[in-house]
Image (spheres, rainbow, N blue to C red):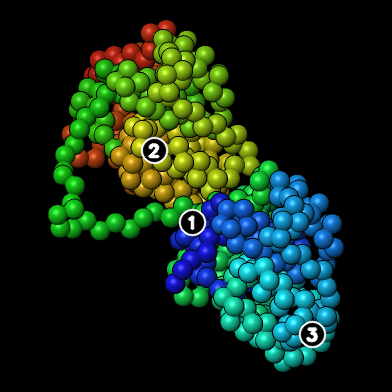
Amino acid sequence: MEKVRMGIEGLDEILYGGILRGGSILVEGTPGVGKTTLGMQFIHEGIVKYGEAGLIVTFEEVPVQMYRDALNFGWDLRRLSQEGKLRVIPTSPAVFQQQIDSPEGLIQRALREMDVRRIMIDSITHFQRITSDPIALRELLNRLLNLLRQGEYTTILVGEVTPSAADISFEEYVVDAVFRLSFEITPEGQSGRYLEVIKARGQDFMPGKHAVAFGPQGMMVYPTPQPKVRVLSGEGRPPLGLERISTGIAGLDDMLGGGLFRGFATLIAGEDGTGKTAVGVHFLHEGANQGEKGLFISLAEKPHKIVSLASAIGMDLRSPLESDLLTFIHRPPMGLNLNELYCQIREALADGSVRRVLFDSLADVEINITSPVRLRDFVYSLLDLFDEHQVTSIFTANVHGDVRETAQVDPHLALIMDTIVLLRYREIEGRRRKVATVLKIRGSDHDPGTRGYKITPKGVIMGPAFAVRDILMGT
């Protein structure tokens, strides 16, 4: 049950470590989705990273074209061929049929002489040039697969599909695994490439469509976030306990009953201009003062601008940046790939040093997700990731000022957040005031009242609680 690593970032994760040794993989999709690139990367990485010689059989391109295309990703297939680690054989389907039936044919000799472990055939759709008889095509493919299984060659078979094709091809039945690449328009109107593992015989894999991108080093796959299923039992159960940590705003800590609980998630929801980001900056700044590393995920504002704005309210973020107590992830919100963002956040948390996270703002995620359920699932996956690393997090979100207080927070988000703080404007004694209310904090009592606050050159300063009479007179 040995697994072969594909060598493609993210794809091995989807396959929980790789594909089974000796498996035949059909990589299918419409033109231009990256099928040949995936195959070439599988061959190249096998040679360079894992010392497994490769064979490429192509019915479409001459070697010089393949070498040229591969150089776009830094893969020097010509050099590997000269070193005897790779053989590229351009041929026709008819000649190929003769070769696989002959033990002394060029292909079978190459397999033996080079001790080939990985093969790519591009593409098996050209077998239809030999015959249109489906029975004859099946027999040809079965002979090929039998040869590959006998030698335990791990093989990628590239296959073309038309955009209108709805039937399942017979190739999908006889191969061991099927990867389907597609180019799709999301409900939000964004275009992108996706990879889906349709089947992988004898092993488990992550279901769903996973985002695909191409970078300087080839194809990258960003798995759709998959919250982990955890069962705690026996002696491995962690000790129960709730530790309070400060938000950096004394009055807000008082409203929360002493601060936030470590490892919990908080939603700061508010109207535009109420200081949601300022509260988050306090949270990270306080963490840096306590020696706790923070991660600032900013989707709209650039890091240098955030540092300048923080300085205007008395919060020094430059020093934590220089001392590695603060890290920024900045992704422009337009056309945001959420799978890629999730993977980048996970990588930033991998070493376990980050203790606090500010995600600013969910409003920038909403423009890329039309479904509230999809937004909830994305946020839940982040919460699961933060819980795994025992990270305390704050998310900011926009609300409208023209609806009832109880209806202002997205109910899909309200259910999964541990703490919710609402910031809004109220007319009190003829003046427009910023006010804060703690709507909920899981596992603790809290101040249910409403307090005014100001954003000053010395930070956010909370005032005393308003009397009920004051609020009623201001409505």
Q: Which residue is mark 3?
A: 98
In the image as oriented, which residue stretches furthest toward the top?
457
Q: Residue at x 45, y 61 (%)?
A: 16
Q: Earlier in the sequence, mark 3 or mark 2?
A: 3
Vertical side of 222 occupied by 402: above or below: above
- In three-dimensional space, the C-alpha distance between marks 2 and 1, rounded to whole angstroms, equals 18 Å
The image shows residue 298 at horizontal and vertical percentages of 51, 30
Q: Label 3 sits on what residue type?
A: Gln
Please state the horizontal and vertical placement of residue 256, each as a whole percent of the image.
Answer: 24, 28
| Frontmost residue, 293 versus 165 | 293
Tags 1 and 3 in contact by the CB under 8 Å rule?
no
Q: Secondary structure at mark 2?
A: loop
- In the image, what residue occupies the spot 44% across and 51% down? 377
Whether pointer 2 and pointer 1 mark residues with C-beta atoms closer than 8 Å, the reply is: no
Query: The disc labelled 1 sits on which kind of residue?
Result: Glu
Residue that mark 1 sits on = 13
**Marks 3,2: beta carbons within 8 A:** no
Tell me what residue is drawn at x 46 percent, y 20 percent. Answer: 321
Tell me what residue is drawn at x 29 percent, y 20 percent.
290
Residue 263 as seen in the image, left or right of residue 278: left
Q: Is residue 357 above or below residue 2?
A: above
Foreground residue, 197 or 140? 140
Separation of marks 1 and 3 at Cα, in angstroms: 38 Å
The residue lying toward the viewer, choosing from 201 and 343, is 201
- The crowding category of the residue bearing disc 3, from other C-alpha atoms within 10 Å (few below 14, some 14 to 19, many at least 20), is few
Image location of residue 76, percent across then percent down: 73, 50
- What quarter of the picture does the N terminus occupy? bottom left
Please tell me in which quadrant of the rendered image residue 132 appears. bottom right
Left or right, 468 with reference to 54: left
Label drawn at residue 351 = 2
Question: In whole angstroms, how far apart are the C-alphas of marks 3 and 2?
Answer: 54 Å
